[in-house]
Image (cartoon, coloured by chain):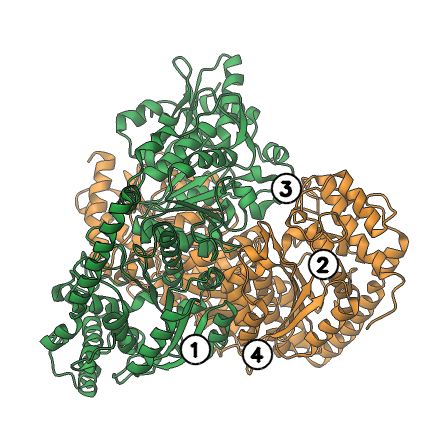
Chain colours: A orange, B green
Amino acid sequence: MTETKVNPTLSINAIRMLALDAVEQAKSGHAGMPMGMAPAAYVLWTEFLKHNPKDPRWPDRDRFVLSAGHGSMLLYSLLHLSGYPLELEDLKRFRQWGSKTPGHPEYEHDPFIGVETTTGPLGQGISTAVGMAMAERKLAAEFGAEIVDHHTYVIASDGDLMEGVSSEASSLAGHLRLGKLIVLYDDNDVSIDGSTELAFTEDRMLRYEAYGWQVIRGVNGEDLEAIRAALKAAQTDPRPSIISVRSIIGYGSPLAGNHKAHSDAMGAEKVAATRQTLGWNYAPFEIPQEVYDDYRQVIPKGQAAQAEWQARFEAFAKANPEAAAEFGRRQERRLPESLSKVWPGFNPGEKMATRAASGKVLEKIVPALPELIGGSADLTPSNNTRTSEMSDFTPANPSGRYVRYGVREHAMGAALNGMTLHGGLRPYGGTFFTFSDYMRPALRMAAIMGIPTVFVFTHDSIGVGEDGPTHQPIEHLMSLRAMPVLWTVRPADATETVAAWQLALERTDGPTALILTRQALPVLEGSSREGALKGGYVVADAQNPQAAIVATGSEVSLALEAQRLLSEQGLRVRVVSLPCWEVFEAQPAEYRESVLPKSLPTLSVEAGSPLGWERYADRSIGLTRFGASAPYPTVYQNLGFTAQRVVDELKALIGA
Amino acid sequence: MTETKVNPTLSINAIRMLALDAVEQAKSGHAGMPMGMAPAAYVLWTEFLKHNPKDPRWPDRDRFVLSAGHGSMLLYSLLHLSGYPLELEDLKRFRQWGSKTPGHPEYEHDPFIGVETTTGPLGQGISTAVGMAMAERKLAAEFGAEIVDHHTYVIASDGDLMEGVSSEASSLAGHLRLGKLIVLYDDNDVSIDGSTELAFTEDRMLRYEAYGWQVIRGVNGEDLEAIRAALKAAQTDPRPSIISVRSIIGYGSPLAGNHKAHSDAMGAEKVAATRQTLGWNYAPFEIPQEVYDDYRQVIPKGQAAQAEWQARFEAFAKANPEAAAEFGRRQERRLPESLSKVWPGFNPGEKMATRAASGKVLEKIVPALPELIGGSADLTPSNNTRTSEMSDFTPANPSGRYVRYGVREHAMGAALNGMTLHGGLRPYGGTFFTFSDYMRPALRMAAIMGIPTVFVFTHDSIGVGEDGPTHQPIEHLMSLRAMPVLWTVRPADATETVAAWQLALERTDGPTALILTRQALPVLEGSSREGALKGGYVVADAQNPQAAIVATGSEVSLALEAQRLLSEQGLRVRVVSLPCWEVFEAQPAEYRESVLPKSLPTLSVEAGSPLGWERYADRSIGLTRFGASAPYPTVYQNLGFTAQRVVDELKALIGA
């Protein structure tokens, strides 16, 4: 694997100068990390990474994640130099509107240029990579190592290792013995504030030993042979590996080793001095042909590897046509036709929590949808996320379809994203809705990337009862609805819960959060899967209605009860269920107007922050305080969620 | 310190049975942890903890934090048995509406019964305790060990140690060498899903060694002498200490050692069996007098300790009357009179980012307000949080007033809360606004507790520019506004930034988030500190206005520019700045109506999610997509934040 290079230094310096020149041209960005990690990245990309720049989507490619996303020019340089569809012109437009080279690497599935995941918020990349390595393990167990057998490589920074999410994810990776996960830790002693001595003096490598990782200490970041040896050792160890690469931030520049090298343009003088120090006799963005020749040796190598894989795949397909078709279907993220036949139905009059309904839906669809891989952050009995046929995903049982994430919501969120990005799986993970706060950065990453991760959030309101205010979501619904791309679905009963899962799974362009009750709810007479699939619909109308009550989730039952009481008083009120605002708002204006006519006085009822309900309602029953610990009927009663209150507010609204 | 107990087993079993009986009565709750940790808690509370149940507010008391808040009955039992103002009747009302014994321990400053912080969301307690220990260190350096010299004790669970926030905080505690922080780790091999073997197989103790802690392994949770020895060793070591207490969840019950002992009522039969096993011959909530006698030995001991402290304090006050007065002022959280004289003024025409204005405010108030302790999560040069007179808070310089939190936003949030709760300090901490997501659970804890932690969030919108969508907040403003109690303040210029700090510091009943720009903004002609202190006001009016534009932060300048353009077209438009919705909404209705008359067609402009602006506006300019990487004027332009767009939308609104 170690070939003789014409001149590795020249190739390495090409990365350094591309980064420096791009930052200089953009007048912003981070060249320090690319300059320090260029040698390690060079060795990884040209000698170890299994990839074909001419087919960035090859399913069995190694994954590379630049967790230290601020050093994006490192990745862009590697992609360009190796022959991915990223041109010099793209590099020149670093950090400019509409370019393929934004400030931090951004995952785009179309066109996919080789950026495996969006990074920038520290800790997300390495934790997402854990999910990728999990997906590889799972799919290898399912389809065989002939078809799925690749590594996940990460470059991570001090900041990545300081973030709690990476601690959670690294502990999980060690627990799962993800031996094909290899992290190059840019151990450069510098963060934004200055030396890591200011805040980060723990023994990082000992910590990773504690997680059960192979730890390779003190690799000189300029010593290609040492880097090679470390990567080889990492590849052969059954544990995940972390290699401490002792690098020099801003290597070659007058600011080398200084925290001022971390970011921002250095100015013409220092750039010129760097050119001199590195012996780089080329203009900005001028790359000598021998550098391209060097990097692009990976193309024939990658093509050959892919061709071999293709041959193996064809043999596999011959022997296992169904499995091969299944592999292809899942790569394309197409749902099987058969799924449409298994959705369960529920009978009005039954009573069950929507989390329980969700569990029943999963019982039906898990057998029909082998790409589903579930899990929970140590709340399995509460989240109803594990079905009777699921076994745990463990080192001994890598084909298991249920992940025990431990009390690690944030790592779970990032790992779900990593599995989704990897392809071949549709992951979901559960926790209490209030703890969506713990994984919010990962949720946002799913939304930014537009990937269909499914988040199962149970215990969705003051209906949690005795556990009290820390466990009762208030602001969470609205704060998720405010997030672009994400769909937030809060079904009113078991029937709508089916629709919620259908929305989540049929979607491929963004994440979905399912918001489910702890407490039992009646299956409603008027509830409708079709209606819920439109985001909102009339669940119970009145002839020539005088007013409407719009609600979601558990409050739809309350609205219906109020409707009945109002009807007894001769008042004609429509009840609208609005489980998913985002989907409803995508309906044609006529449909929306037919459900919630602007002329109809409307009262909203939702056991959460009323902020934002002004969009649909003239008056709102909501919560502007935190909840309280007591049996849930008492909490509902005392915080004003009673049919009588709804009646009173509705009458006040219409002056009746 | 080790006195002969009449019958420690009886005292210990009292905790176990109170927990079990209370859960049985409430039909919900968690008795497993209290039953396992009762012996360790007993030794800690009766022999080590320096406290006076008759004055729970004594400033030099040891702090005790039950990080595993679900085991709240452990804390309630200890408080009651030791003679805090918590009666048997309160215990009987466990988890009932309005009781002092909610499902998870809740901090209430009035009356304060000895619950030092709200816990329940795992990881928060231990991380908050780190802040308490920091406060102790800081105040001891300032006022001397005669006045401030106490420990912070924590009981933490497996779940606490799995959460990333505790990893961050523990790393920080090790870095800062917080030797008076002592954690009793309830190492019971069980979490909700089952054995910790399912998900948590890392070597926790080795991890804490890596953080630089003293690690005391394998202490038998039933061996009082071993617990004593461990606590003594912990007290004398200069490092923070963690003691692995090998306990048995649900000790004494038929479910002992089983994850089913974690929560929920066991049923009468198992409770009876437990009585038998433990030899507990008392009715539910019946406590033999000898148990009270045993626990309440701490009262005279505590009173004596406090009396000694009081004597020392009086001597100190005699020698240092000003320092003693200062100590008292800060305990009461009163701002000094002198503060009113130091607020800076700014001149219209100046141009500066509100983060820079915030830095200038801090330059003025830091000398006047010695209780201020600043910090940043490794973004000091960007957050403008460190003033010229601040030095770093380090083991060698414990009187330093600036904390280098590292890239640990979540631990920072929890530590800020811990310092606030401890008393004597007013902490603030900075990061980018987008990373408020990383600390959201801590933010929420501050809001639930109603404590005046100050969060400084800079880089508040697409104005971040080149760093791109991961670094550009969109949904964050609205998602914070949806949170009860929290104040979200987004000043329009330097003048309003003064008001923002004033609001944050004068407040004592809840946290404040300051939302500040990266980019420079003009100091406005019409901006007003008084107006901003009301949450909203008319920043520039027109005679007999036809419409209003309401905006916050950087978009107020844009609104004013649009107003000028509209005025050239003969249109009379008022511009309203609304930096703090919560404060504005607390103004009298007449004031609000005078600023934003219902009859006035209103357009809102804010570079964030428009959801919720329906409350004030008939039409909104906002963002329903994520941002983009480019120089910020380009991003503003391309995403529709131009004066011309505002003009067009306003004209469309009024049909002009």
Q: Secondary structure at mark 3?
A: helix
- Which residue type does callout 1 highlight? Thr
**Residue at the spot of label 1:** B196
**Residue at the spot of label 4:** A398
- Gap in angstroms between the C-alphas marked 1 and 3: 44 Å
Can you give x and y, in whole percent of width and height, for residue A649 in the image?
Answer: 23, 41
- Whether discs 2 and 3 lie on one chain: the answer is no
**Residue at the spot of label 2:** A37
Circle nearer the N terminus (2, 4): 2
Q: Secondary structure at mark 1?
A: helix
User: What chain is tagged by disc 1?
Assistant: B
The vertical placement of A403 against A632, above or below, is below
* Horizontal side, residue B15 vs residue A601: left or right: left
User: What chain is tagged by disc 2?
Assistant: A
**Residue at the spot of label 3:** B466
Residue B594 appears in which quarter of the rendering? top left
- Gap in angstroms between the C-alphas marked 2 and 3: 22 Å
Q: Secondary structure at mark 4?
A: loop
Structural crowding at the residue carrying mark 2, measured as other residues with C-alpha within 10 Å and reported as few (<14), some (14–19) or many (≥20): many
Can you give x and y, in whole percent of width and height, for residue A287 in the image?
Answer: 85, 50
